[in-house]
Every structure is written in C-alpha cells, then in structure tokens.
Image (cartoon, grey):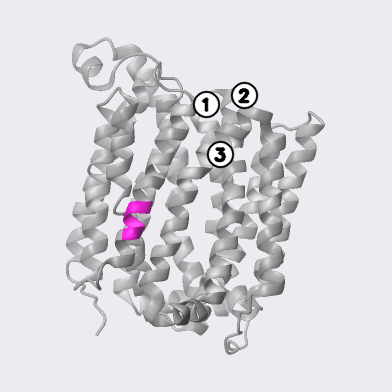
Amino acid sequence: MKILKNELRDFLMLWSTQSISQLGSSITAFALTLWLYEKTGSSLSTAALTICSYVPYVLMSIFAGALTDRFNKKKTMLVCDVFAAVCTVVIFVLFRLNRLMVWHLYVLNAVSGLMNTVQQPASEVAMTIIIPEKYYQKTSGLCSLSRSLLSILNPLIATALYALAGLNLVIAVDLGSFAIAFVTLLFFIRIPETKGVESGSVLKLAKGGIQFLRENPMIMTLIFFMSGVNLVASAFDATLPGYVLPNPKGGSSVLGLVTSCAGIAMILGSLLVSVLPKPKDRVRVIYLTMLFSLGTENFVLAFSREPVLWCIGQLIGWILVPVMSANLDVILRTNIPVDLQGRVYACRNTFQFFTIPIGLFAGGFMVDRVCEPFMSAYGHLSMLNVLFGAGKGSGAALMMFLLGVSGSLICLLTGKKLKKYHYSET
C-alpha cells in the first residue's frame, strides 16, 4: 500500500485538490441555474448557460490541443485556473452591485469555457505523465468516483447554500476551493515535461491530431459513437429542470435529490470499475453499457410521476457510465503517444463534444416551443394524459420519451459498426 501511495503521490494530490476546485465551480454553476430559472422560467434560457461554455470548447479545442503539446502543462493549468476564478469574481461583483444580468452570465460562461478548452487537454496529458500505465484503470475509477461525488454533493450543497445565503456564500465557497487547488498545484506537484513537439504553426500541429484519428478508425468510431450519446444526454440535462421544477411533487430540492442520485449511481459504478478485471473486449463493454443506460433511464422518467421513481431511473441510467468511461480512457491512453496526446485529446473534444451544445439547445427548444405547447393543446387526450400527465412539465415528460427512443436507436445503429472492432490488452 505504501508503494502504491508513493507511485501515485502526485496523481492523488492533483486529483483530490482539482476535484475540490471542480466541486466549487459546479456549486456555482448549479446555483446560477436556479437563479436564472427563477428569473426566466425557461428551460432554454438555463440550457444556454452550458451552451455558452461548450461553444468555445468545441470550436477552439483542436487549436488548444496544439498549444497544450507545445507549452508547459503545469503553467497552462495554473493560468487557466486564474482566468476562471476572475470570471467568478466578476459575477460576484455584479451580483453585489445588483447589476447582474442574464447576458453577463452567458459572456462570462463563454470566457470560462474558453479557458477550460486549453486546460482540459493539458490536464489529460499531465495525468498520463504522472500515472504509471499499470494503474490506468484504477485511477480512471478514482476519477469517475470524484465526478460521482460531485454529482451528489454539487446540487445538495448548492441548494443548501443558495437557500441559506444566496449567491454570496456560493461564490465564496467556490473561490476558497480554487485557492486550495491553485496553491497545491503551484507548490507541491511536479509534472515532468514531455519531449518537444515538432516545429510548425498551430494549424500544422493541429492537423497532426486529426491525422492520427484518421489512421485509427476504431478510436474515431468510438468518438463519434460517444458524440451521439452526448447529444441525447445533453438534451436530457436541458429537459430535466423543466420536468422536475414545475411538477407539483417537484421543486428545487427535489431536483437536487434527483440529480444527486446520478452521482450515487456513479459512485457504485466507480467502485465496480476499481475491482473489475480487464474485460476481454473493451469496445463491446462501451457499446453495451451505453445501450443499457440510454434505453432505460429516459423511459422510466417519462412514464413516472413520483420522485422516488425519478431517483430509481437516475440510478439505473448512470451506474454503468463509469464502466464505459474507464474502458474508453484506457483505450485512449494506451493507443495515443504521449507527445501527441494534447492534440489528439483536443480533437477528441471537438468531435465527441460538439453535440453537447446542440443537444442542450435542442432539449430546451423542444420542451419550451414544441412539447409543452403540444401537450397544452392535446394533453387532455386520454392516451397522452395517461402516458405523460397533464399541466406544465408534461411536455418535458414527452421529451424524455423521445430521448429514450433516440438514444436506443443511436446505440443500435452505431453498434453494428462497433461490433467489427475488438480491443483488449495483451
């Protein structure tokens, strides 16, 4: 055990402190969602917060990856953290002056998303450098565990702090968590540099990441498969507040509880990953876990009216996500050379996550402009009433059903192509 701790010392310090910082950021994001929904009552408006974060992430990732491979990883992460903290301070000042407006949040989220665009591939490469290869699956399980804890603690803490003292206390906690992560990374963590990349323009270096993916069709197919999964999952995220908040048995506290159940499920899945042996075929595991998740959760929520069933749906839908994530992570880390990882991970970010802002917009738009008006006009029909209920929120239930159908079709259709690939370590 002592040897294990020594080998993973830098990873454990980086992982734990960055997780604390991410918790602070997530608390602020959730509280801002509550504040914005109170102001607008619109699923599309709240979804636009995340859209503004992801648009620069998708558009600029390919070029950010080239910069990541060229620059010092540690300094890159520190600079990006500072810019993100400055955005939080600006929100705090505007709120205290009673000048905070919706468009301010959109602009600041876009700036924060741009910083994350540069930081994320740097962080991915840093993890690869400081983790011995034999611990990839176990450390991936720990990363999933921290994300799971964030999913549980984020809405509960955010809801409690927001109810207690509003955005003031929420932002103070966020900045405190940033300080812990920043000081630890600056003074206590050593991240060795990789060998220098070839000279050339950022555009030329970015093409290197795209070229690698073109020469590795298995990885490219997995990335596009996950982009389809992210499309459905992000539309679900945009739909969920409009489904839970207006429901007579819902509200902000119930939304926090339901969201936390996804985190509980991921904790169980993360623990499962940590003890599972290497699978015979990691590609097959990725495909089957996503088929199970997308083919169950949306239908459970669409047809249920009780918070306990919503929680069960979240548990079922998220428990195998860490299993998928760990297998995908091992495939990427063991197949991509370290000196190319910044560029390839950045290209992956663009191709895999470009559907997230699309899904968020589509989910919010469909609930506000299509499904809710449709159920308002035709929800009195007995079949629709039995399936999706009545009143505000029934349109979101209909959208959940459509997402269940779409997610299942994406998995079944893409699965045919994935079946020809097989990946397991020798």
- The image quadrant that residue 242 belongs to is top left
For mark 3, give the secondary structure: helix
Asked if the stretch drawn in magenta spans residue 95, the answer is: no
For label 3, the residue is 157
Q: Amino acid at mark 3?
A: Ile
Q: CA distance from mark 1 to mark 3?
A: 23 Å
Q: Quick one: label 2, few (<14), some, or many (20+) residues within 10 Å?
A: few
> Residue 33 appears at what percent x and percent y?
57, 34
Q: CA distance from mark 2 to mark 3?
A: 21 Å
First of labels 2, 3 by sequence position: 2
**Looking at this view, is 147 or 4 the one in front?**
4
**Looking at this view, is 263 or 33 the one in front?**
263
For label 2, the residue is 39
Q: Residue furthest front?
A: 2
For mark 2, give the secondary structure: helix
Marks 3 and 2: in contact by CB < 8 Å?
Answer: no
For label 1, the residue is 42
Q: CA distance from mark 2 to mark 1?
A: 9 Å
Residue span colored magenta:
267-271
Quarter containing the C terminus: bottom left
For mark 1, give the secondary structure: loop
Asked if the stretch drawn in magenta spans residue 269, the answer is: yes
Q: Is residue 130 above or below residue 26?
A: below
Q: Residue furthest top?
A: 380
First of labels 1, 3 by sequence position: 1
Residue 408 shows in this picture? yes
- The image quadrant that residue 373 belongs to is top left
Q: Amino acid at mark 2?
A: Lys
